[in-house]
Image (cartoon, rainbow, N blue to C red):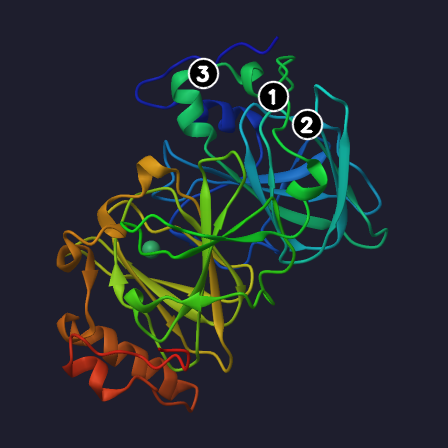
C-alpha cells in the first residue's frame, strides 16, 4: 500500500503526491505547445507523463499529459473520480468497463476528441498507430478530492465497486442535445454525453451573445458528473470581452491562432500566445480576454469547472464587476490588438459600434 504523503507546511496532499511521481511539472500561466513539451517516464503507468500545475489550478484541478508509446497499451486504470481526456495528438482506442456488470464499451478517438471516463470504471487505452506516440491531456478534480481523503490508494485501482449508471452504448455514442429549462441560466442548450469526436470541427454551436465578438459556443455536460466544459468559437480580426470568474479551468486550443491576456485587477498584464494545443489557465478572479489574430476562426475549449467554482461570472447580478464591456476597457487592449494585427498585415474587424454602444448587438443571422 502506498502511504499518504507526509504533510509539510502548507503543501497539499495532492502536490506532494504529484511531486513524488518524479516527472516534469510545468508551472507559470501557460504552455505554448503541449505536443512538444518534455515528459518523464512513469513506470507504474507505463507512459511518459508531465503535470501542469499552472497558477489558478492549485488545490483545485489536475491536468496531466499522458503519452502512449507507438503500438502500446497502458495498464488498465480505475479511478475513484471521473476525468476528462482531450486528444492532443494521435489516434487510439479506449475501452471502458463497468466494474460491477463487466460490460465493456470500446470507442476510437482521433485528434481533438474529448471524452469523459466515469468514476469507478476501468479504463484501458491503446495507441492505434505503430509509428508515432499518442498524446493526451487528462483533467480532473483530484486536488479537491485529496484535500479530503489524502490517500492515493483510495483513488487509483481501489476495489470499491460502483456501476456506471445507464446504457454504455448510449453514454459513449456522440453527445446529444439537451434543452435547458432553468430560466436563471443563460445557457439554453447543452450537449450531453461522454464522447465528443473532434472539437476542431464541432459545428453544433449556439450564439454566445454575452461575451461579444459575435461568438458562438457549445456547453457540454457529462452524464452523472458535476464537472462541465465549454468551447467558444469566434472569427478572425475580433476579440472577446474581458471577464473573470472562479479557479481551476484549463483552457486548451483545438484550432486557431491568437493570444489571451490575463491580469489581476490593477496588476501587470500577462500575454499568453496560442495556437493548436496551447494551454493556459486564468487564475481565480483574474480578468482574461481572448484575441483572434489568425486567418480563420479560433476555438478555445475550457475544461471545468465544478459547480462550486463557477464564481459569480456566470450570474447576471454583478455583471459590471465581472465583465468589462468594450467601451469601458483599457485603451491598451484595443491598441495591442491592432498592433498585433498590423504586424501580420491585417486590420481589426471590430465594429466602431461595439466601442460606443454598451448595448451593441452582433448579427447572428438567426435572430427572430
Ligand atoms: Fe473565462
User: How far apart are labels 3 and 2 at the CA level?
Assistant: 19 Å
Q: What is the crowding at mark 3: few (fewer than 14 residues within 10 Å), some, or many (at least 20)? A: many
Q: Nearer the viewer, mark 3 or mark 2?
A: 2
State whether residue 278 is above or below residue 226: below
Residue 294 horizontal side relative to residue 266, left or right: right
* Residue at disc 3, secondary structure: loop
| Residue at the image point whose x is 68% and y is 27% from the top | 77
Q: Toward the viewer: 151 or 197?
A: 197
* Residue at disc 2, secondary structure: strand
State whether residue 18 is above or below residue 237: above
Q: Toward the viewer: 158 or 214?
A: 214
- Label drawn at residue 150: 3
Q: Quadrant of the N terminus?
A: top right
Disc on the earlier residue, 3 or 2: 2
Rendering coords of residue 329 (x, y %):
17, 70
- Label drawn at residue 77: 2
Rendering coords of residue 37 (x, y %):
58, 51
- Label drawn at residue 156: 1
For ligand 1, which image quadrant applies? bottom left
Which quarter of the picture shows residue 126? top right
* Residue at disc 1, secondary structure: loop
Badge 3 residue CB within 8 Å of ligand 1: no
Residue 336 horizontal side relative to residue 178, left or right: left
Badge 2 residue CB within 8 Å of ligand 1: no
Disc on the earlier residue, 2 or 1: 2
User: How far apart are labels 2 and 1 at the CA level?
Assistant: 7 Å
User: How far apart are labels 3 and 1 at the CA level?
Assistant: 12 Å
Residue 80 horizontal side relative to residue 213, left or right: right
Q: Toward the viewer: 192 or 229?
A: 192
Q: Would residue 113 be seen by someone viewing this image from the given angle? A: yes
Rendering coords of residue 68 (x, y %):
73, 43
Amino acid at each position: 500500500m502506498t502511504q499518504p504523503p507526509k504533510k509539510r507546511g502548507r503543501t497539499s496532499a495532492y502536490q506532494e503526491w504529484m511531486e513524488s511521481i518524479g516527472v516534469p511539472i510545468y508551472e507559470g500561466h501557460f504552455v505554448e505547445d503541449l505536443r512538444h513539451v518534455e515528459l518523464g517516464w512513469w513506470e507504474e503507468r507505463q507512459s511518459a507523463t508531465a503535470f501542469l500545475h499552472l497558477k489558478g489550478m492549485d488545490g483545485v484541478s489536475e491536468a496531466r499529459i499522458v503519452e502512449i508509446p507507438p503500438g502500446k497499451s497502458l495498464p488498465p486504470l480505475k479511478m475513484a473520480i471521473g476525468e476528462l481526456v482531450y486528444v492532443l495528438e494521435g489516434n487510439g482506442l479506449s475501452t471502458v468497463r463497468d466494474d460491477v456488470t463487466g460490460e465493456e464499451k470500446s470507442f476510437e478517438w482521433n485528434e481533438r476528441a474529448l471524452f469523459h471516463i466515469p468514476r469507478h470504471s476501468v479504463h484501458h487505452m491503446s495507441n492505434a498507430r505503430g509509428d508515432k506516440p499518442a498524446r493526451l491531456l487528462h483533467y480532473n478534480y483530484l486536488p479537491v478530492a485529496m484535500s479530503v481523503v489524502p490517500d492515493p490508494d483510495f483513488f487509483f485501482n481501489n476495489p470499491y465497486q460502483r456501476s456506471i449508471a445507464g446504457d454504455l452504448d448510449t453514454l459513449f455514442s456522440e453527445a446529444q442535445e439537451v434543452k435547458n429549462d432553468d430560466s436563471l441560466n443563460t445557457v439554453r442548450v447543452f450537449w450531453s454525453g461522454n464522447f465528443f469526436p473532434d472539437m476542431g470541427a464541432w459545428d453544433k454551436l449556439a450564439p454566445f451573445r454575452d461575451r461579444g465578438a459575435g461568438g458562438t459556443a457549445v456547453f457540454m455536460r457529462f452524464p452523472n458528473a458535476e464537472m462541465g466544459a465549454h468551447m467558444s468559437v469566434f472569427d478572425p480580426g475580433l476579440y472577446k470581452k474581458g471577464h473573470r470568474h472562479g479557479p481551476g479551468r484549463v483552457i486548451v486550443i483545438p484550432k486557431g491562432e491568437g493570444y489571451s491576456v490575463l491580469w489581476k485587477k490593477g496588476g501587470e498584464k500577462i500575454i499568453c500566445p496560442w495556437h493548436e494545443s496551447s494551454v493556459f489557465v486564468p487564475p481565480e478572479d483574474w480578468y482574461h480576454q481572448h484575441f483572434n489574430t489568425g486567418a480563420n476562426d479560433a476555438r478555445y475549449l475550457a475544461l471545468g469547472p465544478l459547480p462550486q467554482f463557477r464564481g459569480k461570472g456566470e450570474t447576471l447580478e454583478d455583471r459590471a464587476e465581472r465583465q468589462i464591456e468594450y467601451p469601458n476597457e483599457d485603451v491598451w487592449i484595443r491598441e495591442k490588438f491592432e498592433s498585433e494585427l498590423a504586424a501580420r498585415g491585417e486590420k481589426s474587424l471590430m465594429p466602431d459600434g461595439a466601442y460606443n454602444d454598451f448595448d451593441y448587438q452582433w448579427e447572428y443571422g438567426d435572430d427572430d
